[in-house]
Image (cartoon, grey):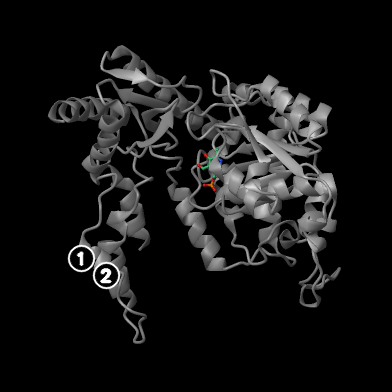
Amino acid sequence: MLDDMLDYVSQIRQRPVWQPAPDSVEHVFRSSIPSASKSLRETHECFMQSVLPYTVGNSHPGFMGWVHGGGTVVGILAEMLASGLNSNLGGRDQIPIQVEQQVVRWMQQLFGFPESASGLFVTGSSMANFIGLLVARTSKIGTGVRAQGLQRVQQKLVAYTTCEAHSCLERAMEMTGMGGHQLRKIPVNELHQMNLKAFEETIADDRALGLTPFCVIGTAGTVNVGAIDDLSGIAAVALREDLWFHVDGACGALGMMSTKIGAKLLGIEQADSIALDFHKWGQVPYDAGFVLIRNSQLHYDTFASQAEYLRRETRGMAAGSPWPCDFGPDLSRSFKALKVWFTMQVYGTDRLARMMEQTCELATYLANRIEESAELELLAPVNLNIVCFRYRCDDADRVNAEIVVAIQESGLVAPSSTTIGGKFAIRAAIFNHRTSQLEIDSLVEESLRFGRSISQTN
Ligand SMILES: Cc1ncc(COP(=O)(O)O)c(C=O)c1O
């Protein structure tokens, strides 16, 4: 099995990025609950035939859709070690928690946070943003809401982000019970960054209505175009207005490892909390989200609870309090930290930084190729590693939607899509460390080839 996975990675270029599974394969997964045992060999064979060829293909260098990392062999091996140990990182006195805490300290250093800051591995930034908002709520209205619920809270809390922010933030507001409508989506400027004047005016309007602004969420790398909000500017307003400053750094925060990219993230070091994903730009296998909180006491107060069966001691296995389960909703937790720890030790931040810079250089190369072509049109400025463009033609929204599907079905490369300023866009998000100029050229050529044929045949 280990050989199969090493072969899978080393020979991945010979496979299509993605292919739809035939009915016969889908049928395999409709059989009922097995009562009799099957051999491991047979089950593995089924995996090789019916699972492995039909993934979304984000390990493939041609994958450029959504925001997916490529993974590494180092990550595969670390996952094997972690599942071999079968550690539960909810708590207790064990070195795996020290590994997680070491990564927390590395993140403190990366973002210029104090040693007293707390951090936690979570599934992804959807969860990390949710935790950030809950701690922000504690900072404004205290912990009484935990027992009494929002019904007993006098203040009507409102948060701010931009119309380009990820949809998980609205969901997080829904899940906190504060309500999705209480998230104000501030318009953006031509660089897709928060319009700070509109932000300040909206706060003033909300205060005039008797509402209580409590949090602002800046984005370090928007999902649509990779824009980075003016984080220093947001930090200054947050300070003046007494708002919690959270950064959604799912896409871009790890860029702090690079001096070049880090310069664009100036202001992130002033955040009260940061959400980020190692499974995106960090190339760690899924899932490896992380939240960093400046004020660990507020973080603890938001989640910690008492239970007799989780009693803490100063000696024995129940020592080492506080435990990770005191800082988030999960009690049972896998050893996600190990694959991050391995990745950071084996590659080091210099090499990871260079890899991230290379994805940005490829995005610039793609943007240049688009601008050189009279048939293609760039739809947004390229700031990091995401490029949005389209084929110029009549009925462009429909034709470009068909182009994206046709390219995905070709199996050569795989962009996704979005809408920019009302225009349907082909979107290439270059997060995979295996992507090279070859795949970028292929994306341009396939866009032109399908653009010509689809626009002519319809
Ligand atoms: C800017 C941004 N925030 C949050 C998320 C959600 O992250 P996750 O998928 O790790 O939950 C994403 C996902 O692409 C994102 O791009």
Q: Which residue is mark 2?
A: 28
| Identity, as a three-letter code, of the amino acid under mark 1 | Ser
Identify which residue is drawn at 44% across, 46% down. 72
Residue drawn at the location 60% of the way across and 35% of the way down:
253
Q: Residue furthest left?
A: 457
Task: State if disc 2 and disc 1 touch (CB < 8 Å).
Answer: yes
Direction from residue 250 to residue 66 in the image, left or right: left
Residue 442: where, in percent of width, then height? 26, 29
Give the quarter of the image for residue 245.
top right
Residue assigned mark 1: 24
Relative to 73, is 22 on the left or the right? left
Q: Could you say where residue 190 lies in the image, as x and y percent from the top left?
A: 53, 18
Q: State the quadrant of the C terminus.
A: top left
Q: Judge whether residue 218 can be spotted in this image.
A: no
Q: Is mark 2 within 8 Å of ligand 1?
A: no
Q: Residue furthest bottom?
A: 36
Cα distance in 3D space between marks 1 and 2: 7 Å
Left or right relative to 344: residue 202? right
Tell me the SS state at disc 1: helix
**Number of residue marks:** 2
Quadrant observed for ligand 1 in the rendered image: top right
Amino acid type at image mark 2 = Val
Question: Quarter of the image containing the N terminus?
Answer: bottom left
Q: Position of residue 391 (x, y in %)?
A: 28, 23
